Image (cartoon, rainbow, N blue to C red):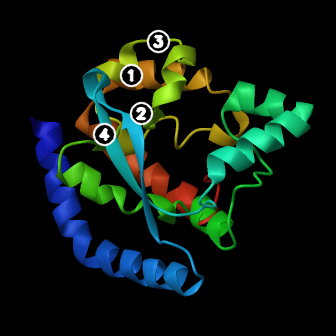
Amino acid sequence: MGKRVFDIVFVLLATPFVAPLVLALAVFLAFQGVTPFYRQERVGKNGRVFKLLKLRTMVHDAETVLKDHLAANPEARKEWDRNQKLRNDPRIIKFGSFLRKSSMDELPQFWNVLVGDMSMIGPRPMMVDQQSIYPSTTYYSMLPGITGAWQVSKRNNSSFAERAHHDTEYWKNMSFSSDVSILMRTVSVVLRGTGC
């Protein structure tokens, strides 16, 4: 209950700063000929699927582009199978790399926190088709977070499976102080532009 109260208070206090920024970014994307927002199915607490809201950083037919790219590039296929992400992702639109590195594409998820789909701090929201390769059940005990232990770790240099370790450690040591610490470290991640 305390964690939920913290989430609501934090979102309400941040909204006057976050909302204008999201609006400005959405307008900029619209002027680039891009639909600014998109929703994607993600897995939440107890396995409930919800619609995650983000600023668009990928082309509209991203799944097809990824499938074709992986079929034509064996090294990219290996990287994707290990990490569930690519360093040189052909799906990223112009300006998308900046949004991802700065993590500003995640800002619309404040709405997901407000309605109870997510928490400010928790595991990175898992895609539905990733459940079979996630080697733990701890994830399902928590609301996924906008930021979290994995998100402020060496995330660009870790495998998808290593996320489970961070999620389990967070679950074991969850506290108000640990959440505040992760929020502070998130500021550093954003300023250093190490998002992905």
Circle 2: element type: loop
Number of other residues with Cα within 10 Å of mark 3, as a class: few under 14, some 14 to 19, many 20 or more: some
The number of callouts visible is 4
What residue did someone put label 2 on?
Answer: 123
State which tag comes first along the sequence, 4 or 3. Answer: 4
What numbered label is drawn on residue 50? 4
Gap in angstroms between the C-alphas marked 1 and 4: 15 Å
Gap in angstroms between the C-alphas marked 2 and 1: 7 Å
Measured from the top left, where is residue 46 in percent x and y?
26, 21
Q: Locate residue 108 relative to residue 31 in the image: left or right.
A: left
Measured from the top left, where is residue 111 in percent x and y?
26, 58
Gap in angstroms between the C-alphas marked 3 and 1: 7 Å
Label 3 close to label 2 by CB (< 8 Å): no
What numbered label is drawn on residue 136? 3
| Frontmost residue, 156 versus 134 | 134
Label 2 close to label 1 by CB (< 8 Å): yes
Question: Which amino acid is tagged 3?
Answer: Ser
State which tag comes first along the sequence, 3 or 2. Answer: 2
Circle 4: element type: strand
Question: Which amino acid is tagged 1?
Answer: Tyr
- Viewer can see residue 147: no
Label 1 close to label 4 by CB (< 8 Å): no
| Frontmost residue, 126 versus 32 | 32
Label 4 close to label 3 by CB (< 8 Å): no
Label 3 close to label 1 by CB (< 8 Å): yes
What residue did someone put label 1 on?
Answer: 139
Q: Residue at x 69, y 42 (%)?
A: 156
Measured from the top left, where is residue 160 in percent x and y?
62, 27
Q: Is residue 10 above or below residue 157?
A: below
Label 2 close to label 4 by CB (< 8 Å): no
Measured from the top left, where is residue 181 in percent x and y?
39, 44
Q: Locate residue 161 relative to residue 76 in the image: left or right.
A: left
